Amino acid sequence: MPNEVRVKIVSHADIVAARQEARALAIEAGFSLCDSTLITTAISEMSRNVLEYAQTGEVTISLLRNGTKSGVKIVVQDCGPGIADIGQVMQDGYSSRKGMGIGLPGTKRLMDEFEIRSKLGNGTTVTMKKWNWNQ
């Protein structure tokens, strides 16, 4: 199995493909079913944002090794309009649309590391890591 997988996000079917790839890498990294579900949920949330706000993007899922510890790194990139106020969108309950407003802050809570970078007119990149603490 490769150590890195890239999935272009242009349709809802691509979200399913990204989830499947992430689950396979998470299992290879030794994650439990519960933790692999958290990883796939995070990918679903971020990929849905790509479709809703930017229409296209890419998810890169990589295996991580840090000594005896393993994990996964997920990078979700788009070339959409960007986010004007990252602080605002990271607040619980905020929604720029009709959603529940749990996407970005909820996803951050699912992962061990979470970083978001965005520039108006140049898109958004979210980098997330989940470590397998049960090794």
Image (cartoon, helix red, strand yellow):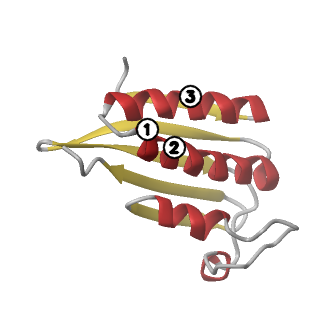
Q: CA distance from mark 2 to mark 3?
A: 11 Å
Residue type pointed to by label 2: Thr
Residue type pointed to by label 1: Leu
Q: Earlier in the sequence, mark 1 or mark 3?
A: 3
Residue 65 location, x and y as percent?
22, 40
Q: Earlier in the sequence, mark 2 or mark 3?
A: 3
In this rendering, the label closer to the viewer, 1 or 3? 1
| Mark 2 neighbour density, 10 Å: few (under 14) some (14–19) many (20 or more) | some
Determine which residue is flagged by label 2: 37
Residue 123 location, x and y as percent?
66, 57
User: Do callouts 1 and 2 mark residues in contact (Cβ within 8 Å)?
Assistant: yes
**Quarter of the figure with the N terminus:** top left
Q: Quadrant of residue 84?
A: bottom right
Asked whether residue 7 is in view, the answer is no
Determine which residue is flagged by label 3: 20
| Mark 1 neighbour density, 10 Å: few (under 14) some (14–19) many (20 or more) | few
| Mark 3 neighbour density, 10 Å: few (under 14) some (14–19) many (20 or more) | few
